[in-house]
């Protein structure tokens, strides 16, 4: 009887061990996607698997390693206002710039391949399960654990930093591939050129990516709903990728999205109401 009670006793949460489990399970699929994916389907399959592996790793950690359960994941549907806020932000990031391109003549609607419009529906829906895969792990499981050790804002920032680090394999490999593809135009030694490219890609993407993690954390905290933040994740990734297929996403659209997410992330981190995250941290 004592042994049974002992086996069910929660083990102290270790961030390092948790990340080791999640990264070992998910990073190989990220790397495979960046190195070997040759089509939209293969890239989607590998990246989606990497995202789902975040949930698999989190489930293993919460169920079998730390045995602390998943009570704070956010098992509620959330309110309509939170869904409207999430989808409104996605529209502001991707749909509005595309409409502006059409109104200013930068994009000719008649030149678009109408057969590709189906992607605008398929990709957001197809990203729901992979989106949940990330949200369950990063927001639903890891963020509350960090909040029990740190202040709410420090926990949100730390979680966003880790989330950005998780994406590094794709960023680094993509940077190397871009440099190799354009290597003939550079007068620098190959190794130096690759290093410079990787540093530029990583550094340039760090701030907007980390601030986007803050936006994710704030949306999850305010809605207390894994469903709301999953819908945001699926809509963000799905519309971005489908619009890239249908209409293309020039650099200015990416700069607009990164600038807006950076501003929102800073605003939420500085002036946001993180009281609910603080309440979650005091439950156990």
Image (tube, rainbow, N blue to C red):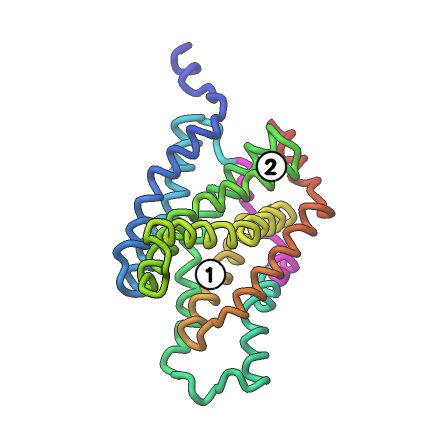
Horizontal and vertical percent position of residue 111: 42, 87
Q: Residue at x 46, y 61 (%)?
A: 237
Q: Which mark is residue 21?
A: none
Does dot 1 land on a helix, a strand or a loop?
Answer: helix
Using the image as rendered, state which of residue 75 and residue 36 is in the foreground: 36
Horizontal relation, residue 148 to residue 174: left or right:
right
Horizontal and vertical percent position of residue 52: 38, 47
Q: Is residue 78 magenta?
A: yes
Q: Which residue is mark 1?
A: 237
Using the image as rendered, state which of residue 72 and residue 204 is in the foreground: 204
Majority secondary structure in the magenta region: loop
Q: Is residue 269 magenta?
A: no
Q: Residue at x 33, y 49 (%)?
A: 191
- In the image, residue 246 above or below residue 13: below
Horizontal and vertical percent position of residue 200: 47, 53
Q: Which mark is residue 155?
A: 2
Horizontal relation, residue 217 to residue 191: left or right:
right
> Is residue 278 at all visible to an observer of this figure?
yes
> Is the Cβ of the residue at disc 2 closer than 8 Å to that at disc 1?
no
Q: Residue furthest bottom?
A: 110
Crowd rating for badge 2 (residues with CA inside 10 Å; few <14, some 14–19, many 20+) = many
Using the image as rendered, state which of residue 78 and residue 257 is in the foreground: 257
The boundaries of the magenta stretch are 71-85
Of mark 2 and mark 1, the one earlier in the sequence is 2
Measured Cα–Cα span from mark 2 to mark 1: 24 Å
Does dot 2 land on a helix, a strand or a loop?
Answer: helix
Horizontal and vertical percent position of residue 56: 37, 40
Q: Residue at x 35, y 52 (%)?
A: 173
Quadrant in which the C terminus appears: top right
Horizontal relation, residue 194 to residue 136: left or right:
left
Horizontal relation, residue 47 to residue 278: left or right:
left
> Is residue 47 at all visible to an observer of this figure?
no
């Amino acid at each position: 009887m004592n042994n049974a009670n002992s086996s069910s006793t929660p083990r102290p949460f270790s961030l390092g061990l948790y990340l080791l489990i999640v990264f070992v399970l998910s990073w190989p699929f990220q790397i495979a996607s960046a190195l070997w994916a040759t089509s939209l389907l293969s890239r989607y399959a590998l990246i989606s698997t990497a995202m789902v592996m975040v949930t698999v790793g989190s489930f293993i950690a919460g169920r079998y390693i730390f045995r602390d359960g998943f009570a704070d994941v956010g098992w509620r549907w959330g309110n309509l206002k939170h869904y409207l806020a999430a989808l409104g932000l996605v529209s502001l990031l991707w749909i509005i710039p595309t409409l502006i391109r059409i109104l200013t003549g930068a994009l000719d609607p008649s030149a678009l391949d109408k057969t590709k419009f189906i992607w605008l529906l398929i990709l957001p829906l197809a990203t729901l399960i992979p989106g949940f895969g990330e949200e369950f792990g990063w927001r639903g499981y890891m963020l509350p654990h960090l909040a029990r050790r740190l202040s709410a804002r420090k926990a949100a920032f730390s979680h966003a930093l880790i989330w950005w680090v998780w994406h590094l394999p794709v960023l680094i490999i993509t940077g190397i591939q871009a440099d190799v593809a354009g290597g003939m135009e550079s007068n620098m030694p190959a190794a130096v050129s690759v290093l410079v490219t990787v540093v530029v890609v990583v550094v340039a993407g760090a701030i907007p990516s980390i601030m986007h993690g803050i936006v994710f954390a704030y949306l999850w905290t305010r809605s207390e709903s894994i469903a709301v933040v999953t819908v945001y994740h699926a809509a963000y990734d799905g519309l971005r990728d489908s619009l890239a297929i249908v209409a293309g996403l020039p650099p200015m659209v990416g700069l607009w999205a990164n600038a807006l997410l950076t501003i929102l992330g800073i605003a939420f981190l500085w002036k946001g109401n993180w009281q609910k995250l603080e309440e979650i941290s005091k439950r156990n």
